[in-house]
Structures are given as C-alpha cells and as structure tokens.
Image (cartoon, rainbow, N blue to C red):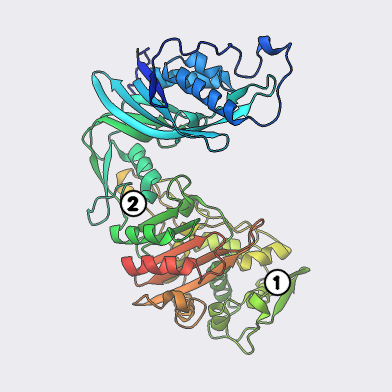
Amino acid sequence: MRSGAKVAIVGGVFAVVVGGVGYGAYNVLDGLNGGGGDGTDSKSTSAEVKTGPVTKAEIDDASKKFLKAWASGDAAAASQLTNNAAEAESALTGYRESAHVTDAVITPGPAVGTKVPYTVKATVSFEGKSKPWSYSSELTVVRGLTTGRPLVDWAPAVIHPDLTAGASLKTGEASTPSIEAVDHNGRTLTKEKYPSLGSILDTLREKYGEKAGGTAGIETWIESADANGPDKTLLTLTKGRPGKLQTTLDANAQAAAEVAVKKFSQASVVAVRPSTGAIRAVANNPATGFNAAMQGKQAPGSTMKIVTAAMLIEKGLASANQKVECPPTATYYSRTFKNLDGFSIPDGTLTTSFARSCNTAFIKLIDDTKDDAALAKEARDVFGIGLDWQTGVVSVDGSVPEETGGEAAAQYIGQGTVQMNALNMASITATAKNGTFRQPILVDRDLDGRQLATASRSLSPSVSQQLTNMMRQTASWGTGRAAMASVGGDKGAKTGSAEVDGQATSNSWFTGFSNDLAAAAVVQSGGHGGDAAGPVVAAVLRAGS
C-alpha cells in the first residue's frame, strides 16, 4: 500500500477530439435526454423498447457521448451513459480526485464491431509537480436490458487497460521506495529488458523497498485490490532514490528464458541452482499477468517419475539396473494405463523404462509398495513438495495428495491429482542432482529473516546417483536426446506430457540439468515433452551453466 494521495477536487480541462474538432467542457451533454445508466429511463416507458444488436450508428453515437462527458470531467453525466452508473461514477470521479488528472484529450478511433478504441493524452499534477501521461484503451457498446438504449458496457479497464475490479488509480508519494534490482553478479534487471520479471519486481519493491535503503518519489499507480498484492506504477512524476536489491537471478539465463518462451503462446520456465536453491531465471509467455512459472498448478506428466523412481529405489523395490516389466498396457483397480503408441520393452531395466518413459513399468510396481500414500510422503519428506516455500515472492510449492486405487496409480506417472509448476519441477530435478532439497529463493533470507522450508531427510548417495544416471541416459539416448544435444557438460533430463481436459493436445513438460543448474519448462498444448518444452529448457541451460 502507498500513502500521500490527497483526495481533493482538482479543477481540470478535458477535451474529446472527434474528426479533428476539439470539444470543451461546456454544453457537451446537450440532447442526451438524461436517463439512468441501468436503462431505467422514465421518458422511454411509453415507447417500445428497442432490441437486437446495437447498430454502427448507435455505437458511434454512444461512444462519442460517453467520451465527451468523461473528457469534460463530468463523472455523473458520463456514468449515466454506462450500464453500471454507480461503479462508473466512483471510478471516473477517482480519475480526477485521486489520480489527479488535471486535463486530458481523448481521441477515439474507428469502431471494430462493438468495440471502440481510443487514446488518452493527459497531464497528472500533484503538489506542484506535473507530467504528461498517455495510453490507449477501449470500450464496448451494448444495448441496455430495460430501456434498449445503447450504453457503454462498464468495466474498470475503460479508464485504463490495466485497471481491474477492486483496484484503483492513485497519485501521491509512494510508501515504498523504488528499487534497482540486480542479478547475483550486480547486473541491473528491469521489466523493460526482462518483461517476465514485471510482477516479480513489483512484489520485491513492495516487500523490500524500504530495506533496500532508497527514498520514495511521487508516482501514479494502480493500487491492487488485494491488500497483499503489489501495486503497479504507471507514471513517475518525481524520482526518489532507488535502493539496490540483489536477487539470485542470472541476467544471461534470464535473457535466454525470455526469448525461449516467446516461441509458444503459453509457456513458462524456471532455472534453479541445485547446490543452493538460488533461482537463476523465471520467464512466462504471456510475460504480463499471472506468473504461471511459479504459481501454476498442473499435472506434470512423466517428469513426476523422478519422484516415483526415487521412492521405488528407496523402498528396495527396484534399482537402476534391475529388470522391470514394460508391457503395452497395465491395469490397476479397473483403470487401464498404456504407453505412447502402445510400445513395450522386452527385458528392459528401470533405467530403460525411465529413459524411454514407459508408463506401465511404474504402474506394475504399485502393488509392491504396500502403501498408497508412499508417493505423497516421498514428495514431501525428500523433495520438499507442499512445505510452504518462502521464495521472496508469491509461489505455489506443489501438491501430491494422498490417494488410493486408480487415482494413486495415476499419480505415479504425473497425472491425476498431482499439481506442479515449472519452479517445482526444477526444484525436484535439483534435489535429485544434489541429493538434498534446497528451498528455491529469489532473495537472500537474511534480508528479512524468513524461515526457509527444509525436507525431513535427504536421498542416500546411492539413490541420488542412480536417479541422476537415469536422467543422464534419458539425455544421451532416451526421449530427451534431441532437446539436450546442444547442451554440454554433465547433463540429464526427463520428458513428460500431461493430458488436460478440454485440450486437444497434451501439455509438454521437460526438466533437465547441466552441471550446477537445473531447469524445467511447461508448454500448454505443446504435445510431447521433448518437442516443445525441451528446447526451452536447453536454451536456458546453455546460457546459465
């Protein structure tokens, strides 16, 4: 939260430009006929209420009248031209009184269907400081439900495209100083250069701005509806002195991650250092909005077999070189599981089934565990899944619920109720490589003394070695071979694909390590792990290892 945004009526001059003609703040509402924004116009009760889609002429007329009223600074009149007058008036009033917009020129563009885009060129003034502010947004015209009048479909984004329900625009002195975030080598990190870090840098500022030692400036920002959510700065009227905040990120790995995820419409990737838990890269496409890389919750497919294999080896039910059965299908509690294209592996070992991603080999071993909750315990006690990670920003630390029957079997191959994100899978790979869970972090714990999660036990050297050797085989001749071919050093991998309801194509998962760097990626509707997510991971490993 920020402070200092004085709420006082500020006289302003606004204008709307239509066809090159400027309209002042007077007489702009002549001929609008009054009426409530909810369609309760008393003058229309005796006339027939118009129905059907709004016409081009109605869209043009309604949008121009609304923009004129808004541009004049008359929030009450503008709100009556929307389908939610109460919310619209409050927001439009706040635009002048809380955001301190003292004048603006609003220029509409040609309508696209029922949507009308427009640009706003404004001036924000606060305590003698002024600065130009420009942006673009759009509105939609709909027909009123009761009067049939064409009205602006009210949404906070009408005022600013980044404004959401419950959030508000403010101008004043920031309660937290800005930060100069740097990577572990002191290289500056900005949201302009690394777009995926936008929400992360906003959160780091909110949490650590004062601790970083800077001084506050005067800004225009979006105040989050969530009391614990980060605010978003839109305009800086006067700069404070930013405090330097060192993160664990690596600029080279981050740059590679930003480029790699852009090849897909929905993709995320995280890289972690196994020896320390330091997060080296976080990237998403789309870059703005929800941080899926650290907050997503999706079934991880066969990448989960790292945890399953660790559990089986620890229980003495299998070993890397032990022969295991891999038939085309396997049934457990009336639920049938199959391998891709129905393949089988005659006389194969656990390593062979792991490297070629044989589902049935793992399903066939379930009965021998004698414990339906064994996988959930392994994930929690060894890999730290579900232990309330304190990374420095908001993150989800994975979930492997205790299940029975066919649902428990589905978990063995990363389906069913298992929920992971790229951060979780990168950490699982890091734990397999290191032998001990190191909770991922973005900033040093000494900054705020937060308690890091610790697993109750480590993998034995023998189990850790078997796991990493199986991952090395996957990278050298198994399903990860093509993706990891360009990665050097000591390397390993695991592929995965996860079916999601409503998607024609499965999600692509891939996780791997190279020397002291582990990375994992997920590409929505990407198909098989090595096809889409694999190259994303490889690009980050090449840059950061």
Residue plotted at (53% across, 18% down)? 79
Residue plotted at (50% across, 18% down)? 78
- In depth, the one of 452 and 21 nearer the eye is 21
- In depth, the one of 377 and 466 nearer the eye is 466
Circle 2 is placed at which residue position? 194
To which quarter of the image does residue 498 belong? Answer: bottom right
Circle 1 is placed at which residue position? 337
Residue plotted at (32% across, 21% down)? 4
Residue 212 showing in the rendered view: yes
Q: At numbered mark 1, what does the secondary structure look like: helix, strand or loop?
A: strand
Graded by Cα atoms within 10 Å as few (under 14), some (14 to 19) or many (20 or more), the crowding at tag 2 reads: some
Which amino acid, by three-letter code, is at mark 2? Tyr
Mark 2 and mark 1 lie on one chain; the one further toward the N terminus is: 2
To which quarter of the image does residue 127 belong? Answer: top left
Q: Is residue 260 above or below residue 129?
A: below
Counting from the top left corner in percent of width and height, residue 509 is at: 52, 65
Which amino acid, by three-letter code, is at mark 1? Phe
- CA gap, disc 2 to disc 1? 42 Å
Counting from the top left corner in percent of width and height, residue 128 is at: 23, 18
Q: Left or right: 101 with respect to 383?
A: left
Give the position of the C terminus as an image quadrant.
bottom left
Q: Is residue 414 above or below residue 217?
A: below
Q: Nearer the viewer, mark 2 or mark 1?
A: 2
Residue 100 showing in the rendered view: no
